[in-house]
Amino acid sequence: MKKFHNLLPFFSNVSFYLFCFFFLITIFFKLNFLNYELYSQNNSTYLSPAPKNEIYNPNLSFLNSMTRLEKYFLHEVGKKELTQTEAIYFADQLLRERFYHRDIIISVSDNWFLHAFNFLSKNRHTTLYTSSLNLNYILESEHALCNQQALIFQELMKVIGIEYQSVLFSIPRNPTPFGHFASAARVDENWFFIDTNLEPSYQTEDHSILPRLLNGDVELFNSLYPEYTLDSMPIGAISTSSLNKNPAWLGALFQTITSSISNYLWLILFFCYLFFKLLSKRTAVK
């Protein structure tokens, strides 16, 4: 115990220096002295580029939070007396118009610790960790990537009590593979395929699309995505997952934790410094 007491001044000094260091780092990135543009669109986790002639309506930019988006969505569904199936395709059209295609990256000023972690990882040249999974953060922007739009679409399905799941594309293809993320929503026993991001042209209420894609229907894939035509597609290259679950909850949790570290680590260290300083003084008095 005496040995621990002798170390208290050391712990106090270490806490103080670490507090100063991380406080200065936090201030530095918060003030954004440099113009950080660390990643290009080519480094996105999902490789599909922007669709041609994509829909975008800047008048919907006021839908900049999940609260506002849900309120607007529910109001329109109720006002137009939409059926569940019609509500699915209304959400599809709404998000096509709300976003244009581009990854929304968490800024260094908002989460420098996440960027430091990403830089030290083997995925430093991708946006695997830094592509935002926070729905409100995504909605603050006018653009979003496929998985980001799918997460928001699935949340809209959740608020109106419709089952949903994720649709994952991992198709070998030259010169680059086709990596993509979409959704499906169910009414009765029918699953409807939805892709708000690449905006393929499909007939509404066609519940044959998803099972055909899952069975490797190359002709259907080529008609939906003519810019990525295939000669063949292995079974399993398109799959579903995360029934009625957020497929990215773990990544979102990690981003939340690192954001807290980025913003408040200096404060924790300051309290540690005060604690060890006070403990050291009390020990000295005794």
Image (spheres, rainbow, N blue to C red):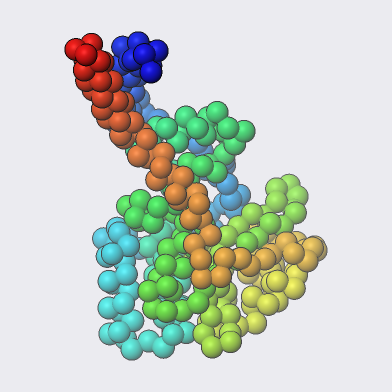
| Quarter assignment of residue 26 | top left
Horizontally, residue 282 falls left or right of residue 142, namely: left
The answer to whether residue 286 is above or below residue 269 is above
- Could you tell me which residue is drawn at 33 percent across and 19 percent down? 15
Residue 22 position in % (x across, y down): 34, 23
- Could you tell me which residue is drawn at 33 percent across and 31 percent down? 265
The answer to whether residue 101 is above or below residue 185 is above
Q: Is residue 13 visible?
A: no
Horizontally, residue 240 falls left or right of residue 196, namely: right
Nearer-the-camera pick, 54 or 233: 233
Nearer-the-camera pick, 2 or 74: 2
Residue 65 position in % (x across, y down): 30, 59
> If the image is split into quadrants, where does the C terminus sit?
top left
Residue 103 position in % (x across, y down): 47, 48
> If the image is split into quadrants, where does the N terminus sit?
top left
The answer to whether residue 124 is above or below residue 60 is above
- Could you tell me which residue is drawn at 31 percent across and 66 percent down? 69
Number of numbered markers: 0
- Could you tell me which residue is drawn at 53 percent across and 80 percent down? 186
Q: Is residue 118 visible?
A: yes
The answer to whether residue 155 is above or below residue 256 is below
Horizontally, residue 47 falls left or right of residue 155, namely: right
Horizontally, residue 201 falls left or right of residue 142, namely: right
| Quarter assignment of residue 276 | top left
